[in-house]
Amino acid sequence: MFETTTRCPAGIVESNAVAQWTARIGGGLLLATSFAVSAAPVPVPEILHYKFDEAGTTVTNHASAPPAGTETGSILGSLVQGGSFSAIAGELTGTGQSSSSDYVNTNWVTSLPGSWTISFFTSAVPASSTLWYIFGDVNAGGFRCFTNGVAGPNNWILRGTGITDVYVNGAAVTAPHMTTYVYDQSVNTIYGYLDGALVTTVAQSGAPAISGPGPFKVGGYSTSSGLNGNMADYRLYSHALTDAEVANLYAYITTQTPLTTDTSHVDVTCNGGTDGTATAIPTGGTPPFTYSWSPSGGTDVTATGLVAGTYTVTVTDDFGDTAQADANVIEPTAIVFSTTTLPDATQFTAYSTSVAASGGTGSITYAQTGGTLPAGVTLASDGTLAGTPTEGGSFTFTVTATDGNSCGAPMDFTLLVDDTIFTNGFDGP
């Protein structure tokens, strides 16, 4: 008969990670089954989230609700951030110096009254008998995490007042590993994960006492020897992550590539038209992608039916990462006639003038599209209006100027043909 852990098997998750389900047989043997499943958005920590991907001694806290004063932390002593732990994570590097001088001051007044999750990556941790501490607060019930000593080589141990020790074995080594501790207050249990898989479950005899005036240190603890090696993606949540979320977090940091996006667009054909389009071109990230265009454009990769304007697309990948880009859809200038009136003509007298318009795209051609021209007068495609009118009177007609995109603008003209000389000279007294 199987005695499984109290948490749901990590196989029942949505994650790109190789999920592992650990079960105990008869109090001794551990079995692990692994298989791959799909990705899901990664929750953002509420309290602390350090990516260590900046230059200098200030580290940004990317938490969703950072406590007052914790918007940035200070990297002190010989600790250095930067480098490239993964495609999306930098790293904090230490050499095991005293935590009295070498640590990240989070500026956080330590307080974890309910459920919580702490997750981090380490690598390049050398074999040694020296105790190296990587986070904690001596003023908060001695809450701390370290390797060597009672932890044993290659292992991380979580300790503190009211906490029954929680070991994550095999994580404090040269190779990169993610260690995650999850305290679920509802069952008063701390769970330990290695690389997204549940490896230990420790019921607590009493409620952990994790509260104090600070400072909460990352990369060190009290005055003890601090981080020796690399730390990446330090996260502190004010709630308990699920198995699925822990597994998915591991997949995210180890497989994700930075998501960026560009756009292409097709301009509006005619001034005032609505046939512009814009297309998002994401790079990196983890598909499938979703799209949201503003101020309009819908939720497809290509926004259609656009008027001239600037459109912003937000691309979201399967892990919940987002990227934005703008597309500037333009329209041709309006086709406007510079000719608005025509000189008068005289019956049976050669006549020549022209109409002209500007704007639009490319060259403009002209055509009569309505009304009547006097007999003997024609309009050429270049706008020349010429001929010898053989009838007199007032003639109203429409000329349409058409550009290279087949966009047209009409203009009404009136041509007066004077026949007075013939009326008075041949029909008068």
Image (cartoon, helix red, strand yellow):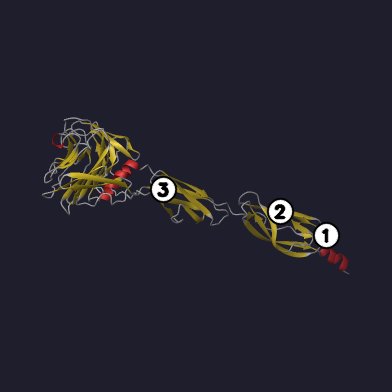
Picture quarter containing residue 56? top left
- Secondary structure under tag 2 reads loop
Q: Where is mark 1, residue-wise?
A: 348
Residue 264 visible: yes
The type of residue carrying mark 3 is: Gln
Question: Which of the marked residues, 3 or 1, is nearer the chain's N terminus?
Answer: 3
Circles 2 and 1, Cβ within 8 Å, touching? The answer is: no
- Residue 313 appears at what percent x and percent y? 43, 51
- Secondary structure under tag 3 reads strand
Q: Nearer the viewer, mark 3 or mark 2?
A: 3
Q: Where is mark 3, residue-wise?
A: 324
User: Marks 3 and 2, how far apart in space?
Assistant: 47 Å
The type of residue carrying mark 1 is: Phe
User: Marks 2 and 1, how far apart in space?
Assistant: 24 Å
Q: Residue at x 31, y 51 (%)?
A: 14
Q: Nearer the viewer, residue 269 or 35?
A: 35
Question: Which of the marked residues, 2 or 1, is nearer the chain's N terminus?
Answer: 1
**Which residue is situated farthest in the front direction here?**
1
Q: Residue 49 carries which label?
A: none
Q: What crowding class fits label 1: few (fewer than 14 Cα within 10 Å), some (14-19), or many (20 or more)?
A: some
Residue 62 visible: no
Q: Which of 205 and 263 is in front in this view?
A: 205
The reply, left or right, for residue 354 in relation to residue 150 is right
Q: What crowding class fits label 2: few (fewer than 14 Cα within 10 Å), some (14-19), or many (20 or more)?
A: some
- Secondary structure under tag 1 reads loop
Q: Residue 381 carries which label?
A: 2
Question: Which of the marked residues, 3 or 2, is nearer the chain's N terminus?
Answer: 3
Picture quarter containing residue 351? bottom right
Q: What crowding class fits label 3: few (fewer than 14 Cα within 10 Å), some (14-19), or many (20 or more)?
A: some
